[in-house]
Image: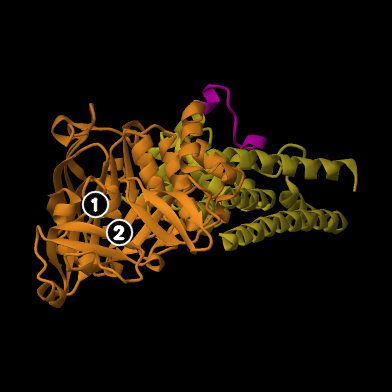
């Protein structure tokens, strides 16, 4: 593997890390909210947040393009302020973040649902405000699920293709991630390089899944102890 | 009765359930009794601020915690109400010390005082998963006390389990009552515990307050009678006075000054506090005027009957031991009442075998 391939791998990992960081706070907040909230509109919100799981990724990418394209209101406004998203690395982060978001939310939400809400209430009676109760009780009790969700989101971001190619294109050296590079290589007949990059991708996926599995097993063991 | 420490006028509604309680709670321990589903836990949660849809008024000392008419509803963290739920509710991710310190990180003195009252210093480094039921309750009680609450709420520690006496929370609650001056609501199913610890009692049933007052005056309230079927116990706090190894007995003196002989408990040092439990049906009643000679029971006390109430199929007799030495509850059959012509005001002998006394 040459320098260019190493760059592609590094770029992909970097984009995936940024996307995970981007979804972490809103994802955990949404997960906690969905785990606790019992009022109207919960079903609708749940559906909207899960949409990227079921929509074709190209449709998600297309919607993002419709939102952020230069001739669209938001995209034009951003462009006026010197923020270019479409066909830049920012588009890669955004597309992979949107696709990863529901995975983090699902895992973290299950973890928060397993936290006894009465413990959070008790923390309140002991003088902790809502935020302190969250950070000192709910999050420490759910952190394995949150971490597993973050690893899942990271894995999804590593391999995202459809939404990314729609909004970020496939520009070598600028927006080309592993998945996009493999597609490109096969298109132009460079199967040998595609095989190498695919092997790296498989390795990364294995590592991420093993991490998730390891966290899940530890979580199960912990639960069995109690 | 001292000035009301807590003023309650609360209405809780949930689908298919309404509870309205209006009362004043004095300082000291108030026992809360009532059948399952009467809303005892809901009342405590409402007072702690953990339930939605609670209307009315709640005043803790000088602090208005809730006043729907004036739009006041303090968040739980601002009410300073110490709440110990049925299962103790310890935080599993924290050590015992982490739990006790949770609400009072800045106030080391209060944490220390709570640890000492509940004698949990040897447990501090442990995981909460490695505690017995009674230990969990003590830790939860210490955790609540460390926040220096205005009101303490205890929900029926280990209701149906009938744990060993040593694992009961009651002796610790007595210490908290005596060392920390604060009002406390104590939900319990155990009539003997309510009598031993509480100076006031409220009885909940049918969505409201069924009765309230001195616990001893409520023994014939239907709910209390129902709970008493499960067994009434005399519970006395006492100290070891001396051991008599040859006689096989240990002498203890209750806080009320009653000398009691129990089976030898040489492992308890002289002066150590103990809790005595005697089931009311294990207290013998002798109607003869003279001291009952020639019986094996070691503890025989003259007593005048101050109450005789039908509690279910039996009759519960409350005898005053005189000179402020306290009272004992005995359970007799209606037939015995007739045969011994028992009546309020009559003097009888109450006798307890050493073996009938359990030490905690």
Disc number lying in front (1 or 2) = 2
Q: Is residue A72 left or right of residue A166?
A: left
Q: Chain of mark 2?
A: B
In the image, what residue occupies the spot 18% across and 55% down?
Answer: B204
Q: Position of residue B137 (x, y in %)?
A: 44, 50
Can residue A83 be found in the magenta stretch?
Answer: yes
The quarter of the image holding the N terminus of chain B is top left
Q: Colour of chain A?
A: yellow
Q: Quadrant of residue A107?
A: bottom right
Magenta highlight range: A78-90
Q: Which callout, 1 or 2, points at the residue further toward the start of the chain?
A: 1
Chain B colour is orange
Using the image as rendered, state which of residue A60 and residue B22 is in the foreground: B22
Residue named by callout 1: B32
> Residue B162's spot in the image, x, y percent?
39, 65
- Judge whether residue B300 is colored magenta: no
């Amino acid at each position: 593997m040459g320098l260019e391939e190493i760059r592609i791998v590094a770029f992909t990992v970097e984009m995936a890390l940024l996307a995970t960081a981007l979804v972490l706070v809103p994802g955990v907040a949404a997960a906690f909210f969905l785990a606790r909230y019992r009022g109207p509109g919960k079903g609708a919100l749940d559906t909207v947040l899960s949409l990227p799981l079921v929509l074709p990724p190209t449709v998600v990418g297309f919607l993002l393009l419709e939102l952020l394209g230069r001739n669209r209101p938001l995209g034009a406004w951003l462009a006026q302020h010197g923020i270019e998203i479409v066909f830049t690395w920012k588009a890669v982060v955004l597309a992979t973040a949107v696709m990863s978001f529901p995975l983090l939310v699902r895992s973290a939400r299950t973890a928060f649902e397993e936290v006894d809400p009465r413990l959070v209430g008790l923390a309140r009676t002991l003088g902790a405000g809502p935020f302190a109760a969250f950070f000192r009780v709910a999050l420490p009790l759910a952190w394995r699920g949150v971490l597993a969700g973050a690893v899942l989101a990271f894995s999804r971001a590593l391999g995202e293709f459809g939404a990314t190619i729609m909004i970020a294109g496939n520009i070598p050296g600028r927006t080309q991630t592993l998945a996009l590079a493999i597609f490109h290589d096969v298109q132009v007949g460079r199967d040998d390089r595609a095989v190498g990059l695919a092997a790296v991708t498989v390795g990364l996926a294995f590592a991420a899944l093993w991490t998730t599995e390891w966290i899940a097993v530890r979580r199960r063991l912990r639960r069995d102890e109690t | 009765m001292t000035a009301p420490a807590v003023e309650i006028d609360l209405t809780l509604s949930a689908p298919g359930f309404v509870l309205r309680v209006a009362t004043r709670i004095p300082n000291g321990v108030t026992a809360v009794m009532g059948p399952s589903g009467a809303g005892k836990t809901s009342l405590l949660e409402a007072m702690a601020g953990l339930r939605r849809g609670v209307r009315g008024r709640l005043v803790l000392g000088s602090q208005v915690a809730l006043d729907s008419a004036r739009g006041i509803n303090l968040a739980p963290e601002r009410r300073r109400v110490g709440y110990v739920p049925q299962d103790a509710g310890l935080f599993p991710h924290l050590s015992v010390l982490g739990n006790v310190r949770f609400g009072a990180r800045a106030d080391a003195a209060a944490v220390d005082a709570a640890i000492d009252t509940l004698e949990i210093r040897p447990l501090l480094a442990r995981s909460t998963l490695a505690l017995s039921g009674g230990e969990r309750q003590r830790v939860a009680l210490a955790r609540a006390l460390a926040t220096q609450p205005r009101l303490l709420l205890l929900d029926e520690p280990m209701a149906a389990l009938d744990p060993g006496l040593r694992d009961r929370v009651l002796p610790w609650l007595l210490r908290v009552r005596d060392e920390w001056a604060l009002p406390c609501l104590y939900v319990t199913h155990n009539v003997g515990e309510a009598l031993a610890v509480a100076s006031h009692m409220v009885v909940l049933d049918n969505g409201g307050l069924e009765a309230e007052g001195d616990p001893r005056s409520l023994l014939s309230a239907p709910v209390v009678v129902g709970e008493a079927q499960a067994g009434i116990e005399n519970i006395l706090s006492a100290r070891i006075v001396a051991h008599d190894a040859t006689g096989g007995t240990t002498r203890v003196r209750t806080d009320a000054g009653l000398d009691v002989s129990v089976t030898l408990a040489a492992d308890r040092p002289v002066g150590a506090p103990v809790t005595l439990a005697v089931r009311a049906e294990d207290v013998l009643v002798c109607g003869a005027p003279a001291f009952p000679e020639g019986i094996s029971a070691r503890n025989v006390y003259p007593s005048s009957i101050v109450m005789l109430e039908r509690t279910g199929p039996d009759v519960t007799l409350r005898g005053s031991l005189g000179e402020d030495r306290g009272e004992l509850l005995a359970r007799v059959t209606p037939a015995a009442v007739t045969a011994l012509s028992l009546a309020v005001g009559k003097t009888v002998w109450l006798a307890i075998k050493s073996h009938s006394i359990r030490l905690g």
